[in-house]
Image (spheres, rainbow, N blue to C red):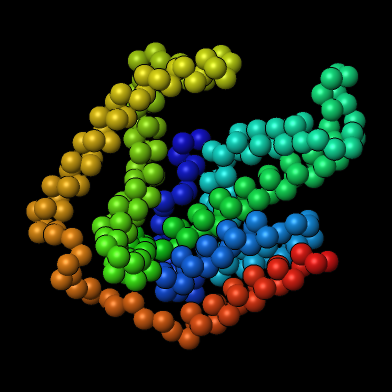
Amino acid sequence: MIGNVTIGQYYPGNTVIHRLDPRLKIMATFLFIISLFIVNQFLAYGLVVVYLGTSILLSKVPLKFIIRGLRPILVIIILTFVLNMFLTPGEVWFSIFGKLTVTKEGFRQASFMAIRLTLLITGTSLLTLTTSPIQLTDGIEKLLNPFRKIGVPAHELAMMMTIALRFIPTLMEETNKIMKAQMARGGDFESGNLIQRAKSLVPLLVPLFISAFRRADELAMAMEARCYRGGEGRTRLKVLRYHKRDLIVAIFSLGYLALLIWSRGW
């Protein structure tokens, strides 16, 4: 399951989505997240699926690869669905064992939350899957540049956010290696109930933290060896410029958001 995490990974390609300006992709991702909280009807989610599905098709990222990334959060999705279904008050639909009641409003809210969470993870994963670490750093820095006037360290914040994001698959891979090493020595991570499985993961924390600090120290030494001194006076091999395709995608994204806002009145 740990190896199925796709957030933070980059899927190389030369598609239209890959070639888009990273600033536009970041802003489009934020618009997509906002749109998920605008939707108030199941029919409107069809428009969201069409928008996201079109983006996935244009990116040529395998659908199996994206679905595999949903497996680690499947438990969270199910738990969110169950809690909303049983804890939302309203008109009683049916009861289980005479004590647990399911309301129509609860089932509707639970379905909304499960769909929203699934689309949220899928949409945000597509950003990192189609944007290289360098492009992502440059895009975040450019978007934060206006805040430098009030003392915000744009380059440093962009660098930290990108490194943290890219460390997710690295730490997942390291966790998988530690688990396999402990299983070879008799460690058991699969038997028992949920609480027992959670307790069995505690011995993973110490070697994982040591490995994370070691990797962070190696990264710092590598950056110092290459004379990294922050963003001051830094030049770029590829300067970010908007193209015609970026304008088309921006208009399409704004039209999608406007259509969703209009759909709230249906």
Horizontal relation, residue 179 to residue 150: left or right: right
Residue 112 visible? yes
Name, please, the residue furthest toward the front: 150
Name, please, the residue furthest toward the bottom: 244
Q: Position of residue 245 (x, y in %)?
A: 50, 82
Q: Position of residue 89 (x, y in %)?
A: 81, 35
Give the quadrant of the C terminus: bottom right
Q: Position of residue 218 (x, y in %)?
A: 17, 43
Q: Position of residue 119 (x, y in %)?
A: 62, 53
Horizontal relation, residue 15 to residue 237: left or right: right
Nearer to me, 213 or 11: 213
- Name the residue: 56% across, 50% down: 121
Nearer to me, 63 or 116: 116
Residue 183 visible? no
- Name the residue: 43% across, 84% down: 243
Horizontal relation, residue 241 to residue 113: left or right: left
Quarter where residue 213 is shown: top left
- Name the residue: 51% across, 82% down: 247
Question: Is 79 above or below relative to 125?
Answer: above
Quarter where residue 43 is shown: bottom right
Question: Is 181 above or below relative to 253?
Answer: above
Nearer to me, 59 or 184: 59
Question: Is 116 above or below relative to 258?
Answer: above
Q: How many marks?
A: 0
